[in-house]
Amino acid sequence: MQVDPQVDAPLIVASLSILLILASSLALWIRHIQKPESIIEQDPGTPAWPIGWVNFGIFVCAMIIFVYMAQVAASLLFFEAPAEGEGTTELTPWLAVLAVLCLQLPMLAVFYGSRRFYPGLYASRLNNTKLPIFTSFKKALRLFLMLLPGVWIAAMLWAKVLSELEGFGLIEDLEQQDLVTLFQGGGDPIAIGLLVFAAVILAPIVEELIFRGCLYRFLKSQTTVLPAQIASGILFSMIHWNLLSFLPLVLVGIFLARIYEKTGSILVAIWFHAFFHAFSLSMLFITNLSDAIPY
């Protein structure tokens, strides 16, 4: 009895995408290593942000307060408290959209508000170089292709470590981030589209302005470059609050800080962040279509 094999197109697309990225990464690294020293550009660096711990603490507290106020207002306006015994409200795509907006927009408001109303403290220069949009796009794409395989390796090693710890009973119930689960589950296409916009456009802008443009530059003013990059990467990963993605996101955070430092432009880091989210969502979409790729 012959079994008619079915071609799993999504699996083929995913495999070819990964192979293409690996080949591109290898070619770019070879080109980078063979680059003559005479044409290696000097790192422009990033301007530190020496505002002191008190002023930085005020900035962070204002951000926390604004985020909390937005979430409370959204809860009062759009949701009713569940009746006793009903448990917590289920996370839906539209609820996720509201949650993301209530997190990202207040942070953006505090960032620009502090620079607008207290320029002497908070309106310091973000960039040491002014790159055109297309130039920053090309730089970010090249760096993304070079560094993404390193994130994959970190993710696989970290998953192995967590699996061993889970086998010993030290940890349990490892779960993906809630937004990842939502994308895998599908739902209202309008809400999913807004979530994609938030992940690929809004989040890279807000998170780079806050974590690299503010946090990293402040830490750099208090210590040296490498410890500031590592500390900002750890804090960047911790804010995502997911053990399964902790180490890969630490590495992504360090890469983003180094990219910012090496290019002197926050725009390159924003593009890199957007590429990372766009590729991750593309792989999730392919996962949903394929029966051969495990969740």
Image (tube, rainbow, N blue to C red):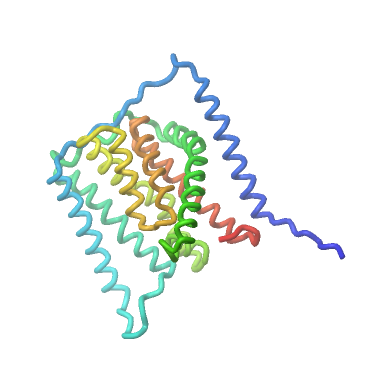
Q: Answer above or below: position of 126 versus 184.
A: above
What is the quadrant of residue 96 in the picture? bottom left
Judge from the rendering whether residue 125 lies leftward or rightward of residue 285; answer left or right: left
Judge from the rendering whether residue 111 lies leftward or rightward of residue 89; answer left or right: left
Q: Nearer the viewer, residue 69 or 193?
A: 69
Which residue lies most toward the top here? 38
What is the quadrant of residue 119 in the picture? top left
Residue occupying image coordinates x 50% and y 54%:
281
Which residue lies most toward the bottom here? 84
| Residue 17 picture location, percent across and down | 60, 45
Q: Answer above or below: position of 126 versus 190.
A: above
| Residue 180 picture location, percent across and down | 47, 60
Q: Nearer the viewer, residue 171 or 242?
A: 171
Which of the image's four quarters has the C terminus? bottom right
Q: Answer above or below: position of 186 versus 235.
A: below
What is the quadrant of residue 55 in the picture? top left
Residue occupying image coordinates x 34% and y 60%:
101
Q: Nearer the viewer, residue 246 or 143?
A: 246
Asked whether the viewer can see residue 194, the reply is: no
Judge from the rendering whether residue 49 lies leftward or rightward of residue 212; answer left or right: left
| Residue 4 picture location, percent across and down | 81, 61
Q: How many marks?
A: 0
